[in-house]
Image (cartoon, coloured by chain):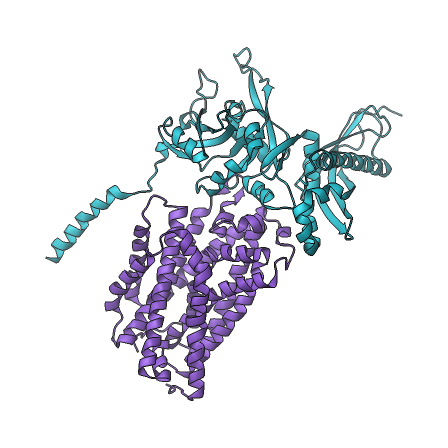
Chain colours: A purple, B cyan
């Protein structure tokens, strides 16, 4: 067992929310609004149900093999070589996802705050901080997350509440204006975000009460869905479905609209700060999963020697996208089928059914 | 060895000092307060900006011995706004900063050419706010910005505050964009003009110099993004009622017993409900306006302080509001043939299936639609008085 730290249910729930939410409210709303307009929130609710199913799948699979991560029981279920291949695929996915997150936030910062700064410096700065935290391991990450989580959520909610003055609830009507196909397309896209809960398979062995894993995963999905739905509501109520869909980062613009008494306005730096902290944790979770996975894959006793090499890989992957349009296009059209079919549903389902057929089961501690 | 390495690393950090790409110092910014855009005879965009002069914003008493103007107005031509800014920056020795721009004024010609040629810059630019007030100047935007305000520091701020008070019809850039995007409503922007403003002479002054000041004067009606006509002040008030925007205003009606004397009622709050009916052929809109007001002024001497008289006043005021709303409706349906009230959006909310076919021809449908306006006014307070203090003894 590589990671000796233990995290409690609360910490792991918050960690899982921070693992999905930051990019889910950064770029996902724009994709959803383009597909399903004012019915986007329905897409999210359907996707959240799918997310719950994925969560149950992953947790029940992990609980069959107590104390083992995805990489360890994959080998146990399928045998050494196929298990290694599955592990390699997941290492790639974790690295690639980290790179996408880094790139997404780099683009956001570049667009919103620092247009003259070369984006690679934003990538390096972000990754350097996360890499430093990686030396501390899981416990440092989850404690940091616990520290910032409530502050970030408070800022976010205050932002929403302050913009109620600009909101008109009628803009959310009529319901079911778009056809079912668009709504389902939207839920497919957002399901790929909720499906990231698969990464929880790397953390279940570190829970102090693994029995609560179902509750942790389910509440993480529900909390994320709640914030995503409320941000969609507020964006549509402020801008109407058409204008809302034209922003790259709709929540950012909704907060920019806040102007109370000619005095309480220009709150956008606040929301940038919230996102930066979220980025830190989100990249941290994926980076850490990649580290832990590769250490187990290589049979190392410590993940620390891998921090720098993997960081460099993430950095170079993050610079692959030539522009923001291509990045967002990838996130909205290619990423959902790619992530969902292979990593979030495909492989876990395969492992689960093979384990069931072969009656494989880990030894209880 | 380790210490030396650390020391060298530390020294090398100083090399980073030169590389702050996004540094911007307040003292190096040209803070734009208002922007005006005109369409020139050479088919170019003329961007006029009002730049704040920070030194004249504080310190020194206003009017005390040659006060400086609080703003500098400068313009440049270009093919697009950014292009014009490039020429502008050849004249402005500081970095042009849009973060505090409060108004966007389109010249009449520019608005007729297409507001869409202009507005995208202000939406896309990260510094410009989505809350800029959009206005159309009767005449040139350039002249509009060249004025100053006696009460506020600059005419941009004066125009911004006028909009913020919502005394007339006012619209933010984002609201304008939403109207442009929706098929169920055509955009309307605030109309502004310059008007001669007499100003009270200060102590030791004979008379302050005559100049023009900004005034809100109705609204400009657009078809998609091109301006097609104006609404006057009264029609703009009717527009506000029918659009369901917060209405603050005064209704003046003849006193019931003495028709040549007037009574004024201040409208405190109001609401608008638009209920569409569609039977597959005819469209009917039932519009219910409710207003709550205070009876604030009376010219005549009759005693209006009885429940019956108040009821009478209420119905008279309702008639008056109905008249104003009909005025705007008549102009929109008859003259412009454009749904500027968002009735289409209301229709969309109730008949979403039928809307899919009707929306592409909504102008025609709106023109044919029947609109019934019902108004209810409630007078809650009567100011500090029951009857006139000067009511003669009986």
- In this image, A62 relative to A135: left or right? right
Q: Quadrant of the C terminus of chain A?
A: bottom left
Q: Using the image, determine if residue B164 lies above or below residue A54.
A: above
Q: Nearer the viewer, residue A262 or B78?
A: B78
- In this image, B166 relative to A66: left or right? right
Q: List x then y, in percent, for residue B355.
A: 68, 52
Residue at 21%, 45% (x, y): give it.
B14
Residue at 60%, 43% (x, y): give it.
B179
Residue with the most extreme top position: B206
Task: Examine the rendering and report whether any part of residue A54 can be seen.
Answer: yes
Q: Nearer the viewer, residue B47 or B298?
A: B47
Q: Using the image, determine if residue B236 lies above or below residue B280.
A: above
* Image mark count: 0
Residue at 44%, 16% (x, y): give it.
B66
- In this image, B321 relative to A19: left or right? right
Q: List x then y, in percent, for residue B118.
A: 50, 36
Task: Examine the rendering and report whether any part of residue A150 can be seen.
Answer: no
Q: Nearer the viewer, residue B106 or B270?
A: B106
Q: List x then y, in percent, for residue B162.
A: 58, 31
Q: Using the image, determine if residue B221 lies above or below residue A266.
A: above
Residue with the most extreme left position: B1
Residue with the most extreme right position: B394
In terms of image quadrants, where is residue A343? bottom left
């Amino acid at each position: 067992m590589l990671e000796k730290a233990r995290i409690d249910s609360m910490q792991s729930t918050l960690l899982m929310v921070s693992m999905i939410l930051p990019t889910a409210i950064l770029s996902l709303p724009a994709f959803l609004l383009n597909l399903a307009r004012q019915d986007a929130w329905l897409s999210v609710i359907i996707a959240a149900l799918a997310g719950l199913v994925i969560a149950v799948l992953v947790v029940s699979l992990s609980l069959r093999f107590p104390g083992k991560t995805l990489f360890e029981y994959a080998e146990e279920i399928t045998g050494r070589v196929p298990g290694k291949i599955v592990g390699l695929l997941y290492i790639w996915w974790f690295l690639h996802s980290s790179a996408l997150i880094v790139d997404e936030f780099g683009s956001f910062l570049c667009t919103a705050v620092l247009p003259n700064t070369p984006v690679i410096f934003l990538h390096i700065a972000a990754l350097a901080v996360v890499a430093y935290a990686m030396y501390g391991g899981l416990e440092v990450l989850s404690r940091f997350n616990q520290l910032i989580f409530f502050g970030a959520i408070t800022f976010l909610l205050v932002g929403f509440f302050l913009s109620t003055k600009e909101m008109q609830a009628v803009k959310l009507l009529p319901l079911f204006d778009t056809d079912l196909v668009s709504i389902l397309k939207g839920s497919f896209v957002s399901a790929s975000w909720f499906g990231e809960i698969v990464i929880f398979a790397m953390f279940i062995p570190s829970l102090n009460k693994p029995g609560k894993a179902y509750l942790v995963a389910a509440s993480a999905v529900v909390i994320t869905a709640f914030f995503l739905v409320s941000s969609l509501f507020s964006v549509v109520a402020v801008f109407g479905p058409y204008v809302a869909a034209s922003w790259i980062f709709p929540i950012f613009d909704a907060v920019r609209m806040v102007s109370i008494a000619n005095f309480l306005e220009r709150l956008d730096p606040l929301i940038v700060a919230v996102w930066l902290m979220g980025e830190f944790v989100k990249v941290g979770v994926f980076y850490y999963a990649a580290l832990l996975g590769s250490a187990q894959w290589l049979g190392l006793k410590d993940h620390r020697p891998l921090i720098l090499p993997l960081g460099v890989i993430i950095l170079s992957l993050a610079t692959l996208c030539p522009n923001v349009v291509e990045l967002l296009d990838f996130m909205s059209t290619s990423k959902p089928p790619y992530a969902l079919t292979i990593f979030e549903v495909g492989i876990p389902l395969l492992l689960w059914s093979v384990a069931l057929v072969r009656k494989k089961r880990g030894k209880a501690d | 060895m380790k210490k030396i390495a650390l020391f060298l690393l530390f020294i090398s950090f100083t090399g980073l000092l030169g590389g702050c790409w996004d540094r911007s110092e307040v003292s190096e910014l040209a803070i734009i307060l208002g922007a005006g855009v005109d369409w020139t005879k050479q088919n170019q965009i003329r961007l006029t900006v009002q730049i704040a002069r920070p030194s004249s914003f504080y310190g020194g008493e206003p009017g005390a011995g040659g006060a400086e103007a609080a703003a500098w107005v400068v313009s440049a031509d270009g093919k697009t706004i950014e292009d014009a800014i490039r020429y502008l920056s050849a004249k402005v020795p500081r970095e042009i900063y849009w973060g505090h721009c409060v108004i966007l004024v389109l010249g009449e010609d520019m608005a007729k050419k297409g507001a869409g040629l202009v507005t995208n810059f202000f939406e896309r630019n990260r510094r410009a706010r989505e809350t800029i007030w959009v206005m159309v100047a009767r005449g040139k935007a350039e002249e509009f910005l060249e004025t100053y305000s006696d009460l506020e520091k600059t005419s941009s701020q004066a125009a911004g505050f006028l909009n913020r008070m919502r005394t007339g019809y006012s619209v933010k850039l984002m609201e304008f964009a939403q109207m442009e995007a929706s098929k169920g409503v055509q955009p309307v922007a605030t109309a502004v003009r310059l008007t001669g403003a007499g100003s009270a002479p200060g102590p030791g002054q004979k008379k302050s110099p005559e100049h023009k000041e900004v005034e809100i004067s109705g609204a400009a009606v657009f078809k998609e993004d091109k301006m097609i006509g104006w609404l006057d002040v009264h029609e703009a008030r009717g527009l506000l009622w029918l659009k369901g925007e917060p209405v603050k205003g005064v209704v003046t009606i003849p006193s019931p017993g003495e028709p040549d004397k007037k009574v004024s009622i201040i409208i405190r709050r109001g609401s608008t409900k638009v209920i569409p009916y569609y039977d597959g052929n005819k469209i009917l809109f039932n519009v219910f306006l409710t207003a709550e007001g205070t009876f604030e002024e009376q010219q005549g001497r009759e005693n209006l302080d009885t429940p019956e008289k108040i009821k009478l006043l209420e119905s008279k005021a309702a008639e008056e509001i109905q008249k104003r709303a009909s005025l705007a409706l008549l102009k929109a349906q008859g003259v412009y043939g454009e749904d500027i009230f968002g009735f289409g959006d209301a229709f969309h909310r109730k008949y979403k299936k039928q809307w899919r076919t009707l929306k592409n021809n909504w102008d025609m449908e709106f023109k044919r639609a029947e609109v019934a306006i019902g108004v209810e006014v409630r007078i809650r307070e009567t100011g500090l008085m029951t009857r006139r203090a000067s009511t003669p003894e009986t």
